[in-house]
Image: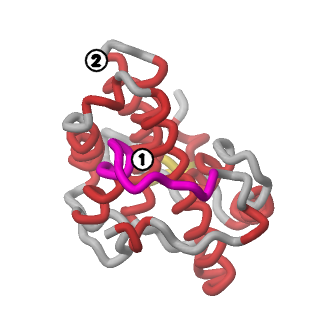
Amino acid sequence: LRLQWEPTVNKKHLRAIPLQIPREGQAISFMNYLAGEGIFGKATTLSPNEALLMKCIQTVVPFHEFWKEDNERALAVGLLLRYLRNTFVSDSAIKEADWFRQRFRNEVVICCLINILELIGVYSDHSVVVGRATKTGNRLVHGNRRDLVKFVAKRLPCTCLRELHRAARKKVGKVGRCHGCLKDFPRIQLRV
């Protein structure tokens, strides 16, 4: 399972997260659990969008140590970010223009998990974590590739995704979903 979430690291990204990843621990168990659930496979079919956020929240709940251990939580966030960065950089180089129009739901799930883990570090109240995760999660679930790249790029110490984010800003507009008619619109039209 570890081979699914631990892709090879490009040498220029070595400082983003230490290469000495422990063999066991709460973060490693979490990553292996996600691999077992098929989160790291692009062909994985996940439940409908509305249940996606609840699935993410329910995924984190059994790993109660994340509520106490900052180091384990930070390691899990770092590993998830590293996986997404490597995936974005390698896939965008291969697929070029089509990459901006594609959207894999496993990437959305991973971004939502990162957001939840970050919120756990800030808020101790479970209901606050769920509320804030829902707000950001809705933007990620109903957004596009641009939103995902921005989410990951803001959290990385390296600049490897900045060019990709600039390209996404030019090629893909901001979109959101109307919760009344469930249609996608440019985000500016959704403001009242």
Crowding near the residue tagged with mark 2, few <14, some 14–19, many ≥20 C-alpha atoms within 10 Å:
few
Helix, strand or loop at label 2? It is helix
Instruction: Give residue 127's mark.
Output: 2
The residue shown at (35%, 51%) is: 24
Residue 138 position by quadrant: top left
Q: Amino acid at mark 1?
A: Arg
Residue 164: percent from left, percent from top: 73, 64
Q: Which is nearer the eye, 153 or 35? A: 35
The residue shown at (26%, 37%) is: 63
Q: Amino acid at mark 2?
A: Ser
Instruction: Give residue 177's mark.
Output: 1
Residue 82 counted in the magenta span: no
Q: Which is nearer the eye, 150 or 156? A: 156
Q: Earlier in the sequence, mark 2 or mark 1?
A: 2
Q: Which residues are magenta?
A: 18-30
Horizontally, residue 27 falls left or right of residue 18, namely left
Prevailing secondary structure class for the magenta stretch in the rendered image: loop
Horizontally, residue 53 falls left or right of residue 106, namely left
